[in-house]
Image (tube, rainbow, N blue to C red):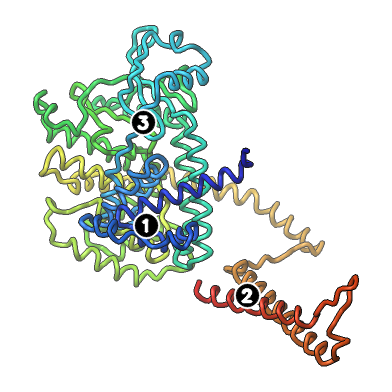
Amino acid sequence: MSFPYPFRRQFAEFGRVRRIIEVLIRNGLGFLVSQLALDRFLPRFWRRPSIRAEAAATHRSVPERLRYTFEDLGGTYIKVGQFLSGRADLLPPAYIEELSKLLDAAPPVPADEIREVIEDELEAPVEDLFATFDDTPIASASIGQVHRATLVDGQAVVVKVQRPGIDDVFETDLDLFLRQARFLERRSETMRGYNLTAITEELARSLREELDYQIEGRNAERLRNNLSSDGRFVVPRIYWGLTTRRVITMEYIDGIKLNQLDRMREADYDLTSVAQVTVEGYLKQIFVDGFYHADAHPANLMVVDYHIGFLDFGNVGHLTPGQKELLGDMFLQILDEDAGGVARSVVKMGATRGRPDLEAMERDLQRLLVRYWGVSLEELPVGEMLAEVFETAHQHKVYLPGDLALLARTIITLEGTGRLLDPEFLLVEAVRPFAVRLVRERFSPVLAGRRALRVFRQATDLAQSFPRRLDDLWDQLEAGEITLGVEVRQLDEVLGKVNSMVQRVVFAVVVAALIVGSALILHGGKEAREFSLLGLSIPVAEIAFVGAMVAGAWLLISMIRARKI
């Protein structure tokens, strides 16, 4: 007997929730089961967490427990953790730093299944596509795994192939995340304040993009073009004829990864110079190009014959020209201890609900920056400080774009990579020239001329369209077709509450009517109390009383539960 698809999916989701709860308890995060309302999926006898498991994990910090939880759950959850590590506006720096260490590894897929994916995508046998293809993967992660190969012209390449069926797994998990986020937002004002549904939708968009290797290929190509004028950097070439949504083929670059310090020392590389060039490359991407490789982990960077090579382009960040300018302002304001300026820049960067209290935000930022004032440059954690600034903004209902939050994670990781190579490396000294350059460019005659030309074009367009718009307005006025739209904030929520109140009042009236009607029937005597149907005597009054009692109890319980929520 086979169950219909919706029931099979519900059973699968129930099994995943049970697995999540088990891992949370084992890693000392059992308190999250009730806070996230996951216990509603379990029978009552299963809801008491294991005190022994909780105690065994207390030697780790909560951020460490969270990282181990994501790693134990694997797959989608590792990607969720990596996504959250880029949301410095939502999580404290300790969580950002810990989640940035997430290791994405998985058992390899059998070679015949990998070959089947390649042949389905590229519509040809592997032997016809490549001169050689190594069935043993050089890396295996939750989404795909990487194999070495050789093209027919002898070019060494790597082929990254998506795991079979991974699309369905991710879609099912994302659907579960989204429904849980909507449930929590309905249940909690705090979760609504975090924009939980919007964040989950952003997560889903990010993961779907990562599942499309054509997007990763375009990211690599854009980064390659941006860095092409600087001979210090290497970005592998993408072979588009052998690239699809589930397969990507790129040039193989042979080098030493930046986390292999001993090998670099044996090859006589100057680690201080390697750190300086790597960081300058990233700052150029961020402050000049506005498009950057967002995973600065040393395992994704390598030294290739005195050049810095980049790997893995599934995670990138974007900054608009306006965001770059405001970012330059904010860095200089942080370094100049200008809390008021930081508050104004942050508000300009993000979206707000209502009018933020700039004075309150300035006071909080002042307290934040005071902790770093007087700290030597050698000890100043630029990425951590930036993450705390973004977190403070979120507390004041200033919601920053995901790319800005991702930037804080990138800088934290970049700072760690720089200090891994050179313990005396100072990121703040490397950042200042780029921030100053952004401010200077804003006041340069060329840029001022471009802005003036843009404003002139906009004014010209407005002047040309103004008579037509005025004529349209006059025609609508004469025809009596002008309407005024009034938007009431949170109108849907208010109407929902009013509707719920009306329904309860109507329900209470029905219950009262049942009670009164039953009393009148009882008062009418034995003949009125009994109703005969097909020879059976039915006690109408008693049934009505029992129904009114049950309905009244249900109404009372629903009101108590609503008050708790």
The residue nearer to you, when weighing 239 against 148, is 148
Position of residue 251 in the picture relative to residue 171 (left or right) = left
Mark-to-mark CA distance, 2 and 1: 39 Å
Give the quarter of the image for residue 351.
bottom left
Q: Amino acid at mark 2?
A: Trp
Q: Are marks 2 and 1 in contact (CB under 8 Å)?
A: no
For disc 3, the neighbor class at 10 Å (few under 14, some 14 to 19, many from 20) is many
N-term-proximal mark, 1 vs 3: 1
The furthest residue to the front = 535
Task: Please name the amino acid that badge 3 sits on.
Answer: Leu
- Tell which of 417 and 48 is nearer to you: 48
Q: Hey, what amino acid is under mark 1?
A: Leu
Residue drawn at (60%, 79%) of the image: 556
Using the image, determine if residue 180 lies above or below residue 445.
Answer: below
Q: Quadrant of residue 418?
A: top left
Give coordinates of residue 225: x percent, y percent.
37, 27
- Quadrant of res 356: bottom left
Q: Which mark is residue 90?
A: 1
Percent of width and height locating residue 296:
28, 38
The residue sitting at 85% across, 91% down in the picture is: 525
- Look at the numbered disc 2 and give the secondary structure of its residue: helix
| Secondary element at image label 3 | helix
- The numbered dot on residue 223 is 3
In the picture of the structure, the residue carrying the numbered disc 2 is 554
User: Mark 2 or 1, which is nearer the eye?
Assistant: 2
